[in-house]
Image (tube, coloured by chain):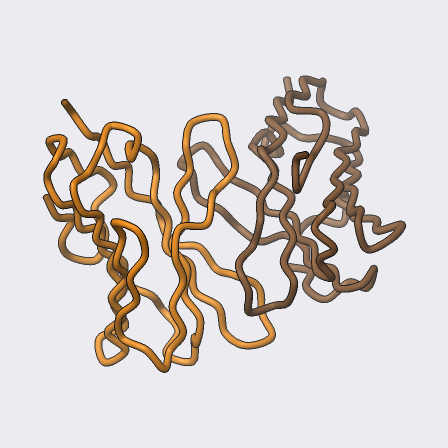
Chain colours: A brown, B orange
Amino acid sequence: DTAVSQTPKYLVTQMGNDKSIKCEQNLGHDTMYWYKQDSKKFLKIMFSYNNKELIINETVPNRFSPKSPDKAHLNLHINSLELGDSAVYFCASSQSADSPLHFGNGTRLTVT
Amino acid sequence: GESVGLHLPTLSVQEGDNSIINCAYSNSASDYFIWYKQESGKGPQFIIDIRSNMDKRQGQRVTVLLNKTVKHLSLQIAATQPGDSAVYFCAENQAGTALIFGKGTTLSVSS
């Protein structure tokens, strides 16, 4: 019974394509996040949603659009993929802003 | 074994040694701190947390120390085991914002 699950695990696509990554949490948490991990393992916050509402939107290109249909899901849609988008994307959830984040196992996106 | 200074990207220790991983955080207003462990192909996993009203917290084989004066956080792992080999991240949180992660330290444990 995976707490935070994201699909797909691997995503290989060409430049210019549009792709989506899905995330679901069964922990009953109110807050969900997307983080990007680059090739040097640096983890950077992209978005944060609380109860389906956008709370944090870091300086992410507007080609990235998160969507939260309900508080258990936070999907990430990326338009016009670029080579620099290649990274591992992690979804996470937490009960509140100052409680531990629970992470999914990541989606490795490779743009060729 | 110990990673000293602001940040060392790697730390190699022998099985059974105690490991100390250090982290300098950036925001003096941060009030919540977490250590995460990330194994290859997996997401970061919570190890231990500490709030700014404490300077030490202990878990099973792990201890986190917080020095707010110099904005320094450390993770001590007792009797390090091969299964402890992973990348370790510290993270800080200021009320109302998301967790900000530091650069990771790769811990390698040889038997």
Q: Give the residue drawn at x 56%, y 32%.
A: A87
| Relative image position of residue B81 (x, y in whole percent) | 22, 33
Q: Give the residue drawn at x 37%, y 78%.
A: B52
Along the line of sight, the residue nearer the viewer: A2 or A91: A2
Residue extending farthest to the front is B60
Residue extending farthest to the right is A69
Q: Is residue A92 above or below residue B16?
A: below
Q: Is residue A111 above or below residue A28?
A: above
Along the line of sight, the residue nearer the viewer: A109 or B11: B11
| Relative image position of residue A30 (x, y in whole percent) | 74, 61
Q: Give the residue drawn at x 34%, y 44%.
A: B88
Q: Is residue B10 above or below residue A55?
A: above
Along the line of sight, the residue nearer the viewer: A40 or B45: B45
| Relative image position of residue B6 (x, y in whole percent) | 21, 57
Q: How many marks?
A: 0
| Relative image position of residue A34 (x, y in whole percent) | 65, 48
Q: Give the residue drawn at x 14%, y 22%.
A: B111
Q: Is residue A79 above or below residue B8?
A: above
Q: Is residue B19 left or right of residue B24?
A: left
Rendering quarter of residue A99: bottom right
Q: Quadrant of the N terminus of chain B?
A: top left
